[in-house]
Amino acid sequence: MRSASRWLPTVARTTGIILLTILIVFAVFRATAPFLISSGLVRSGIERVLSEWTGYRAQIEGDPTLDFWPSPRVTLNQVTIREPTRNGKVLGHVDSLSADFSLWSAIRGHAHFHEFHFLRPILYIRRDENGLIDWTNEGRLSKAIEQAEASSGGGLEMRKDQDAAIGMLTIEDGSIEMTDERSGNVYKLNAVNADISWPRLSQAMTAVILARFNNQDIKLNFNSTQPLLFFAGKNVDTKTSFVSPLISWTYAGIASISDFSALSGNLELSVPNVPSFLAWSGQHLPAADALKNVSLNADIAAIDNGLRFNNLNFKVNDSAASGIMDLNYRSRGKPKVSGTLAFDQMNLNPFLAAFSMRLAAETAIDALLNGNPLQRLDLDMRLSSNKASLGPFQFENIGASLLVAGGKAKFDIGDSGFEGGSLTAHLEVAPGDFDGGGKLQISIRNADFGGLFTRLKLIGPLPMPSSGSLDLALSTSKPIWVATLSDVAGTMHFTSAAGSFRQFDISTFRTLATEKAFFRMSDIANSSFDFDSINVDASFAKGSAEVKNASVRGRNETVTLNGVVPFRTNGLALSGAIEATSPSNADELPMLPFFIGGTWPNPVVSPVATLLQRPAQPSQQQ
């Protein structure tokens, strides 16, 4: 203990002297640094560094400002990057550029910079036909990317003298303008603020970018352990996310800046407002109001000439589905989406809205990257659902297909339960960029139409059959999303089993026909007419239905109708007759012709003045 007490004060004094000496040297060094360092050296050093990194000519118009606390830092104003030719094209401009530098290296006549801050930079970049970014002109970054592009294997090895330090890059209130030579489009980002952490060329990069695109704020996060390989267009493990009020997505896995076929990872995508997203991206999708929101989550894997979405969970509006989907593409022609989706319940309106897609891109990458995500797309989808709806109509255990190819769009329901019976349907949109019209065919068997009429709350005298069958064939020469009933033509055939014709008292009808020249249908609405069958044929054209040989056959009497029902006026003009079902009852129930005209549901009935009697049958000679 006595020995330690002897040398401890000596060690403390020595340590104190050393620390004091270091502080004095540091203070003197800092105090004399502004006199030892040439601002011209720092300025020329910045110009040299920028030129070396970009491969272009850097020009600085403003005088540099040096700060030495808390760390040596230089600030330069009005920095311009040009092509290395006379009157070269401007590739970038920065209002103010600042960077930290090594004080000791500067005193020795060398300038080494790091931790760059760019204030209001404007950058002009070009994406070539191969999907790659024209980063630099044979500069240090360009050479590093070329080396990464030429390297074999998944790793990246760099010599120590090539592996330059970068540090933190900060961008404040910048702008980016990218010209895409593949599509001819020009994309602009404003209000760009970014923090990019890239310690060295060979190390990982993390970037957070905030910007404004088409008047919407966006945020992009990017993380890659091999950024040089990524910029070289190679397949690299990345994690990236994009967030905006109108679309957001997150992707983690293998990606390539030049080729989507390299994707292999997990994708989560959400479009909370489809019409607003289409308007923001400059697209037009007729009938897009039927699409409210879309989201999906899937594992993506590359397949021959395309991508496969495995373990797909897909949602349109309130309809959720799971299944598998493929995106196939060619160097020329339209991309194709095919697959199978199974729903618990779904609304068919959004799928029918797919017919109105007006698409015109040449490749899958063009369609997905170049401003027209719905531009030319073939579809071949198989859909199934326990329950489905189309407006007020309900379906059960539906199996359907959606096909868009060769200028045509087809939607088929191969089998479905409908109102206790079955339904098949075929909807086809004619060629002509989906502007050439379309046709609809529906076949319904043994459905409860009476229950359907009641649920739809249809008013007026209507048949309420226990079951019925319908064959409907309609067509239009106008685009289906703008066609009205006046533009539709076609035919209908309806048959039914027994039921009752509500608000139709046939006995009162006969009585009033003998007493009055005119009466309303509401005057005979106090009872119903039971029938055994209904048979109706009708044709549609120019906004009207022409009823042909419609008959409501009761046990004792039969009602027949012929005439026209205009849709636009909600009116009708029908001639009809009531007669005995069996000829043997013709004397007891003579034929009663009549005319019905006016507005539904309470038109006017006008009986024919003279009752038509059947001619007496001549007696047979014995």
Image (tube, helix red, strand yellow):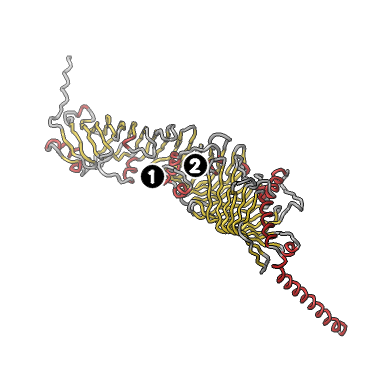
Asked if one can make out residue 277 in the rendered structure from this viewpoint, the answer is: yes
Q: Residues within 10 Å of mark 2 (few under 14, many from 20)?
A: some
Q: Which of marks 1 and 2 is nearer the N terminus?
A: 2
Give the residue at the far top of this rendering. 622
Is residue 537 rendered to the left or right of residue 200?
A: left
Horizontal and vertical percent position of residue 269: 54, 50
The answer to whether the residues at label 1 and label 2 have Cβ atoms under 8 Å apart is no
Horizontal and vertical percent position of residue 288: 43, 45
Q: Mark 1 points at which residue?
A: 391
Horizontal and vertical percent position of residue 277: 47, 49
Q: Mark 2 points at which residue?
A: 374
Of marks 1 and 2, the one in the foreground: 2
Asked if one can make out residue 318 in the rendered structure from this viewpoint, the answer is: no
For the residue marked with disc 1, what is the amino acid?
Gly
Nearer to us in this view, 494 or 90: 90
Q: In the drawing, what numbered circle is on residue 432?
A: none
Horizontal and vertical percent position of residue 89: 59, 46
Give the residue at the far left of this rendering. 515
Q: Which quadrant does the C terminus fall into?
A: top left
Q: Residue at x 24, y 31 (%)?
A: 562
Q: Is mark 2 on a helix, strand or loop?
A: loop
Nearer to us in this view, 326 or 400: 326
Q: Which residue is drawn at 34% across and 34% down?
A: 488
Residue 511 lies in quadrant: top left
